[in-house]
C-alpha cells in the first residue's frame, strides 16, 4: 500500500531526476535565526511537507463547473478581509514605521491573533511581508533568507500540521519557476511579492469556497453531529442557515478544552437549534443523526485525517450505523504524511484538567488528536472541490509534479 503513496512516487522520481548542484539549497540548523518565543510543543520535527496549487479541473465527485460556480459566488458575495492591501501599503504590519528589525515570528503572532485567520494563513501573511522587507540583493540570497524564515516558523510549533504545510506550500508557490533566476532582481522580487499576496488571497477565500460547496449537502430537516470547534464547519453551517435551510445540530462537549461549548454558543447566536452532548453519548444519539461534520488539523496521503481527539471513535460509530462522515478542510492542510496507526503521529500534548486530584502513579493520556483512516470517511469538502478519500493521494501527486 505504501508503495502507491504520493510520497513514494514523488521521492522515486526525484531520485531519478536529481537537481543540478547550483539549484540545491542546503541549510543546517545552525543557519536558522534563534526563536525568542517559547515553543508550545517542543518535540522532534515530523517532516511535514505539502505544496499548493489551485486546479481548474478535478477528477472527483464534482465537475469543474460546480467548483467554478462556487468560486465565482465567493468573488461576488464575500469580501476578502482587507489584509493584503495592508501588507502592500506598509511592507509589514509590525516592523514598518517602528525602526525595529523585521521579525517573522512577531509578524506571524500579529496575524495569528486575528480570530478569523487560520494559523497557516497567518504564516503565509508573515512570509509575504518578509519578502517585501528583505534587503537581499540577489535572488539566491532572497530564497535562502525566505527558507530560513520558513524554517523558523515551522520550528515555533513542530506539532502543527497546518503551520508546517502552509510554509512549505508558500515556498513552492512563490518559487516554482526557475526562470526567476535569469530575470532582473528587482523584477524577480516583485514577482515573488505578487505571488505571495496572490497565495494569501487564495488561502483567505478557501473557507468561503468550501462553504459554498458543503452547504449543498445540508438538507431541510436534517440532524448534524459536529465535534470540536472548526471554523470551516461553522462557515458551512452559517451559509446553510443564511439560505434558510432548517436543520438542527448535535454538538459534542469536546473535552479537554470544551470546544463544543464555544461552537454551540456560535450556533445559538445564529438561531440554529443546537443540543450539547457529553462526548461519551455519541453512540447513544447516533440514531438521530443524518450526517457527521468535522474539520481537520491535517489531511494525509491516504485520504485519512488528523483531528481533535475523539474524531476516530465518532467516525467508527457513524460507519457502523451507515451515517455519512463529511470533512471540511482547506487544501493547505494537505500533508505528505502516511500514518499507519495512531502511534505514527507526533503527539500534540495539551494540559488536561479533571477537576479532581489524580492519584499518585496514575498515568494520564494527554495527546489532543487522533488519526481517522479513510475507510471511515465519506467525502472531503476542500477548496479544490469535493473529493473522495481515495482521490487525495492523486491530488498530492499532481500538486508535487
Image (cartoon, rainbow, N blue to C red):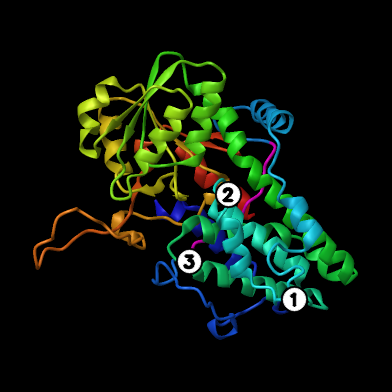
Quarter of the image where one finds residue 30: bottom right
Q: Which residues are magenta?
A: 47-56
- The numbered dot on residue 141 is none
Residue drawn at point x = 31 percent, y = 48 percent: 309
Please tell me whether mark 3 or mark 1 is closer to you in this view: 1
Residue drawn at point x = 60 percent, y = 65 percent: 14
- The numbered dot on residue 99 is 1
Seen from the viewer's position, the closer of residues 208 and 81 is 81
From the image, tell me which residue sits under label 2.
117
From the image, tell me which residue sits under label 3.
47
Quarter of the image where one finds residue 146: bottom right
Q: Callout 3: helix, strand or loop?
A: loop
Q: Is residue 212 left or right of residue 97?
A: left
Give the spatial CA distance, label 1 vs label 2: 27 Å
Please tell me whether mark 3 or mark 2 is closer to you in this view: 2
Mark 3 and mark 2 lie on one chain; the one further toward the N terminus is 3
Give the spatial CA distance, label 3 vs label 1: 36 Å
Q: Is residue 354 above or below residue 328?
A: below
- Residue 49, visible in the rendered structure: no
Residue drawn at point x = 64 percent, y = 45 percent: 204
Location of the C terminus by quadrant is: bottom right
Residue 54 percent across, percent down from the top left: 67, 44
Q: Is residue 18 above or below residue 393?
A: below
Is residue 55 located in the magenta-colored stretch of the structure? yes
Q: Callout 2: helix, strand or loop?
A: loop
Q: Callout 1: helix, strand or loop?
A: loop
Neighbor class of circle 1 (other Cα within 10 Å; few <14, some 14-19, many 20+) is few
Q: Is residue 274 left or right of residue 114?
A: left
Amino acid at each position: 500500500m505504501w508503495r502507491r503513496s504520493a510520497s513514494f512516487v514523488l521521492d522515486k522520481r526525484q531520485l531519478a531526476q536529481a537537481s543540478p548542484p547550483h539549484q540545491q539549497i542546503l541549510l543546517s540548523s545552525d543557519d536558522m535565526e534563534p526563536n525568542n518565543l517559547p515553543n508550545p510543543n517542543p518535540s522532534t520535527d515530523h517532516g511535514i511537507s505539502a505544496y499548493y496549487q489551485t486546479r481548474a479541473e478535478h477528477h472527483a465527485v464534482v465537475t469543474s463547473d460546480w467548483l467554478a460556480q462556487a468560486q465565482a459566488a465567493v468573488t461576488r458575495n464575500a469580501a476578502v478581509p482587507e489584509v493584503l492591501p495592508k501588507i502592500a501599503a506598509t511592507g509589514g504590519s509590525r516592523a514598518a514605521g517602528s525602526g525595529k528589525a523585521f521579525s517573522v515570528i512577531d509578524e506571524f503572532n500579529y496575524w495569528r491573533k486575528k480570530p478569523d485567520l487560520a494559523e497557516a494563513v497567518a504564516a503565509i501573511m508573515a512570509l509575504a511581508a518578509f519578502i517585501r522587507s528583505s534587503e537581499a540583493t540577489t535572488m539566491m540570497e532572497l530564497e535562502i533568507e525566505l527558507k530560513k524564515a520558513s524554517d523558523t516558523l515551522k520550528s515555533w510549533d513542530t506539532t502543527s500540521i497546518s503551520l508546517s504545510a502552509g510554509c512549505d506550500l508558500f515556498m513552492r508557490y512563490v518559487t516554482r519557476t526557475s526562470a526567476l533566476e535569469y530575470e532582473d532582481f528587482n523584477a524577480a522580487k516583485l514577482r515573488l511579492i505578487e505571488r505571495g499576496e496572490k497565495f494569501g488571497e487564495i488561502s483567505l477565500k478557501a473557507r468561503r469556497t468550501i462553504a459554498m460547496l458543503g452547504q449543498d449537502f445540508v438538507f431541510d430537516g436534517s440532524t448534524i453531529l459536529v465535534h470540536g470547534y472548526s471554523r470551516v464547519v461553522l462557515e458551512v453551517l452559517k451559509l446553510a442557515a443564511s439560505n434558510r435551510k432548517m436543520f438542527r445540530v448535535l454538538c459534542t462537549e469536546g473535552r479537554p478544552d470544551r470546544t463544543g461549548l464555544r461552537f454551540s454558543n456560535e450556533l445559538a447566536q445564529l438561531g440554529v437549534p443546537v443540543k450539547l452532548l457529553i462526548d461519551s453519548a455519541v453512540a447513544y444519539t447516533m440514531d438521530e443523526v443524518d450526517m457527521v461534520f468535522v474539520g481537520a488539523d491535517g489531511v494525509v496521503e491516504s485520504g485519512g485525517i488528523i483531528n481533535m481527539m475523539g474524531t476516530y471513535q465518532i467516525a467508527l460509530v457513524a460507519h457502523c450505523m451507515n451515517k455519512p462522515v463529511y470533512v471540511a478542510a482547506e487544501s493547505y492542510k494537505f500533508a505528505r504524511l502516511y500514518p499507519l496507526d495512531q502511534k505514527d503521529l507526533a503527539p500534540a500534548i495539551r494540559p488536561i484538567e479533571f477537576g479532581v486530584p489524580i492519584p499518585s502513579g496514575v498515568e494520564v493520556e494527554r495527546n489532543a488528536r487522533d488519526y481517522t483512516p479513510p475507510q471511515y470517511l465519506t467525502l472531503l469538502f476542500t477548496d479544490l472541490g469535493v473529493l473522495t478519500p481515495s482521490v487525495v493521494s492523486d491530488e498530492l501527486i499532481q500538486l508535487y509534479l
